[in-house]
């Protein structure tokens, strides 16, 4: 793996969105100025971040406690090799210069940053059906606007830093407490100490948010550790869809993305969290995403991880209330030098809970995709139904697809289904499409598109188009 | 000059010889029918001509005077060669419409918007009495045998090849489906499209008139004639030809 990571730089020139950005004059990449902070992860930095943000004492304490845990915790004992990740070399906090408050309209966003968004094709997704949108530029939220109708419903959608000040009671109650405590793992502890930015969504009882809430994260600083925090609270009977996209131009230095997403789906609520990850290929993408799902609530995770060098991501649904339901729909793609250790965790902790996991992964050019899943049914949880389906396409002989499903059932009458299928791109399908006049590259990308279609169709149109485009670029020249 | 001209064509798959030297000319506008028992090599011949990479081919195959064997499957298709599969392959998640739009653009160099192309599809499907929902489904995904065969014929009618190779268009169909597929092929044939049809039964010839009928056995053409040959096989079986 170490060798593979070293090659990642060249790959990025060849593939994907990075190629587009690397074609830009270099000064344009960097002409957003930064107040660069000292490198290394120290207690002094924790204090400085909290101070710069003007945080209340309780949040500083939370950060310091997390930092203490971070220092003690070992690195994960499973999964990809992280030995090349040099945490001390990371810059944990930067902010664009010359800016005090988050602008509230697209016009207020600095032109340079707007241009970068243009290059990334963000505005298409952003402008079209934006009800509420904010985009995070590095760790600061730069743009947010909310339609009045949503505010009138009592919905809160703001950046996490503002939420700490404006809604301290809510944040204190939910922020890294029951859902993802700092002690969960090394990276959640790191996150607890250095988190910056992210979004806070609060939907009051019975409110159904009519449009999806969207945010776009960008990492635009080399050797950066981006750690945004997303907290979504849906009260009883509420419903909300939240979508985030992320990307980063390519830098020669390794960067870290270590986000935490916490979701509280109240009784009878419905929450859908969608994310499209397309970080550049030298980003370590190590996240903790979890939802606590109450009685009769429905939690849906829809996601695609395309970019990054190493990704470890296992969104988790804790079904704590009777009749709660979780759906996990994911696409993972690993090209040259990429390791995707992704999956889903579903903990059935109450009777009559149900879940469905569908994972589609594709590897090519020596990439490694590994489905790592946990399905747990607790003692006395009767009437549980769960299904896991993971399919992989291996495009060539250099690439590897693995499945590591753990199923732990402690209840007698649970109905559990597990299906896994691993295959190469079918010669029959390829020949069939080519016999219609479609060339090999296009045929491959059509087949792959068809393979991921059950998940792509769950995405809003703009994201579906983006997803197909990215996969198509990735698969170019994949076979033959 | 014949549209398709085969000379001493040999086809093998993993070292095993399946076609052992076939010479055949299909002229412009002609319909040739190949009959023969299972395993005689009929389907292999069509699949190899379409460029299936699992076969290695020796001898010569000219299409419009050009060397067919040097071309990849998609290049053959773009020049106007079409294979209607005996068992059409499922490609789930991709609609027939979106695949056909690409195929159409590749064949005629005419890039159309989905809406424009939809008009063409509509006209063709109406002519064949097919429901519109047919196009939005995944390619051959969850379709009955009859629907798959109709899908192949529909694709054929949209792509308007110079030479249509039909591999057992009549197999596995009930009487009604057989009627519909036969009528659809007959309609397409009316505009003079050249065809090379593999079949077990002379029945398909009720809707299409064959110029030549060939019988294949053990990888070779052992008899050629006109439609009477097909009728005779229908009545007496193959054994008399093979003796």
Image: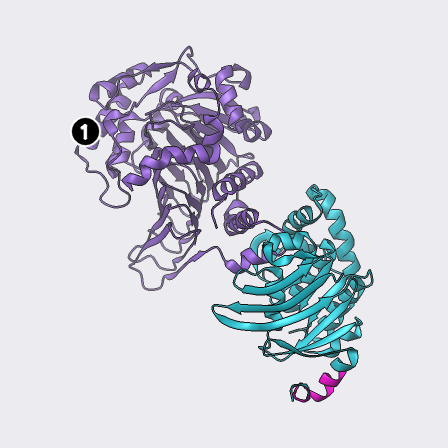
Indicate the quadrant containing the C terminus of chain B: top left, top right, bottom left or bottom right: bottom right
A262 sits left or right of B243 in the view:
left
Q: How many marks?
A: 1
What is the residue that sits farthest to the left in this orientation? A72
Judged from the image, the secondary structure of the residue bearing numbered disc 1 is helix
State the residue in front, B205 or B69. Answer: B69
Residue at the spot 76% in from the left edge and 73% down from the top edge: B212
A427 sits left or right of B200 in the view:
left
Place of residue A471 in the rendered image (x, y in percent of width and height, measured from the top left): 50, 42
Place of residue A277 in the rendered image (x, y in percent of width and height, measured from the top left): 43, 36
Indicate the quadrant containing the N terminus of chain B: top left, top right, bottom left or bottom right: bottom right
Q: Any idea which chain is the cyan one in this picture? A: B
State the residue in front, A20 or A37. Answer: A20
Neighbour class for label 1 at 10 Å: few (<14), some, many (≥20)?
some
Depicted A205 relative to depicted A144: above or below: below
Q: Any idea which chain is the purple one in this picture? A: A
Residue range corresponding to the magenta coloring = B231-240
Residue at the spot 66% in from the left edge and 64% down from the top edge: B147
Write down the residue under mark 1.
Answer: A68
User: Where on the picture, by quarter, is residue B239?
Assistant: bottom right
Q: Is residue A286 visible?
A: no
Which chain's residue wears label 1?
A: A
User: Where on the picture, by quarter, is residue B4?
Assistant: bottom right
Depicted A266 relative to depicted A92: above or below: below
Q: Is residue B239 magenta?
A: yes
Place of residue A359 in the rendered image (x, y in percent of width and height, measured from the top left): 43, 50
Place of residue A149 in the rendered image (x, y in percent of width and height, measured from the top left): 57, 27
Residue at the spot 56% in from the left edge and 64% down from the top edge: B57
Coloring applied to the structure = by chain
């Amino acid at each position: 793996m170490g060798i593979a990571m070293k090659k990642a730089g060249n790959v990025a020139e060849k593939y994907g969105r990075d190629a587009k950005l690397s074609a830009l004059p270099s000064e344009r990449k960097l002409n957003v100025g930064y107040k660069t902070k000292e490198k290394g992860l120290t207690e002094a930095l924790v204090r400085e971040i909290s101070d710069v943000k003007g945080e209340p004492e309780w949040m500083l304490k939370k950060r310091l406690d997390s930092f203490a845990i971070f220092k003690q915790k070992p690195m994960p004992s499973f999964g990809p090799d992280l030995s090349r990740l040099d945490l001390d070399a990371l810059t944990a906090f930067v902010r664009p210069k010359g800016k005090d408050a988050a602008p509230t309209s697209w016009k207020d966003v600095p032109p340079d940053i707007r241009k970068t968004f243009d290059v990334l094709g963000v505005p298409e997704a952003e402008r079209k059906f934006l009800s509420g949108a904010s985009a995070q530029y590095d760790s600061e939220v730069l743009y947010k606007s909310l339609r009045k109708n949503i505010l009138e419903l009592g919905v809160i959608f703001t950046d996490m830093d503002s939420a700490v000040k404006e809604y301290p009671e809510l944040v204190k109650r939910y922020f890294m407490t029951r859902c993802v405590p700092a002690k969960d793992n090394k990276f959640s502890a790191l996150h607890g100490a250095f988190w910056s930015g992210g979004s806070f969504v609060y939907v009051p009882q019975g409110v159904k948010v009519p449009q999806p809430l969207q945010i776009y994260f960008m990492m635009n600083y080399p050797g950066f550790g981006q750690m945004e925090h997303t907290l979504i609270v849906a009260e009883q009977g509420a419903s909300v869809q939240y979508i985030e996209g992320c990307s980063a131009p390519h830098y020669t230095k390794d960067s870290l993305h270590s986000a935490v997403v916490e979701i509280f789906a109240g009784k009878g609520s419905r929450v859908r969290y969608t994310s499209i990850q397309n970080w550049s290929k030298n980003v370590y993408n190590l996240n903790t995403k979890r939802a606590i799902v109450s009685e009769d609530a429905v939690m849906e995770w829809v996601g695609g991880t395309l970019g990054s060098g190493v990704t470890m991501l296992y969104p988790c649904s804790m079904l704590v209330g009777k009749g709660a339901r979780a759906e996990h729909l994911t696409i993972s793609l690993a090209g040259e030098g990429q390791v995707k250790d992704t999956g889903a965790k579903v903990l059935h902790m109450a009777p009559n809970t149900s879940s469905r996991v569908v994972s589609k992964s594709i590897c090519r050019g020596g990439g490694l995709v590994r489905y790592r899943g946990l399905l747990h049914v607790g003692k006395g949880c009767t009437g549980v139904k769960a299904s896991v389906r993971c399919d992989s396409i291996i495009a060539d002989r250099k690439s590897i697809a693995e499945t590591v499903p753990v199923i732990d059932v402690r209840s007698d009458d649970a109905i559990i289904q597990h299906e896994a299928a691993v295959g190469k791109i079918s010669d029959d399908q390829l020949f069939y499409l080519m016999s219609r006049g479609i060339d090999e590259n296009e045929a491959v990308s059509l087949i792959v598109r068809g393979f991921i279609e059950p998940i792509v169709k769950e995405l809003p149109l703009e994201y579906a188009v983006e997803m197909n485009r990215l996969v198509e670029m990735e698969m170019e020249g994949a076979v033959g | 000059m014949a549209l398709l001209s085969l000379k001493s064509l040999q086809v093998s798959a993993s070292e095993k010889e399946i076609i052992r030297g076939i010479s055949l000319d299909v002229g412009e506008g002609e319909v040739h029918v190949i009959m023969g028992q299972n395993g005689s090599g009929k389907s292999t011949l069509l699949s190899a001509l379409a460029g299936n990479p699992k076969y290695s081919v020796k001898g010569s195959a000219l299409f419009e005077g050009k060397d067919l064997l040097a071309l990849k499957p998609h290049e053959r298709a773009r020049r106007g060669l079409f294979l209607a599969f005996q068992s059409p392959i499922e490609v789930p998640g991709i609609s027939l419409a979106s695949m056909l739009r690409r195929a159409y653009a590749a064949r005629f160099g005419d890039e159309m918007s989905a809406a424009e192309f939809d008009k063409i599809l509509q006209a063709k499907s109406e002519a064949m009495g097919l429901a519109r929902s047919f196009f939005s489904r995944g390619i051959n995904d969850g379709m009955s045998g009859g629907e798959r065969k109709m899908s192949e014929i529909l694709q054929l009618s949209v792509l308007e090849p110079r030479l249509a190779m039909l591999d057992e268009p009549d197999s596995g169909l009930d009487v009604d489906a057989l009627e519909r597929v036969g009528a659809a092929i007959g309609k397409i044939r009316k505009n003079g499209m050249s065809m090379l049809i593999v079949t077990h039964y002379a029945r398909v010839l009720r809707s299409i008139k064959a110029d030549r009928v060939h019988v294949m056995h053990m990888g070779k053409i052992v008899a050629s004639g006109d439609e009477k040959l097909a009728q005779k096989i229908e009545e007496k079986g193959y054994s008399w030809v093979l003796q």
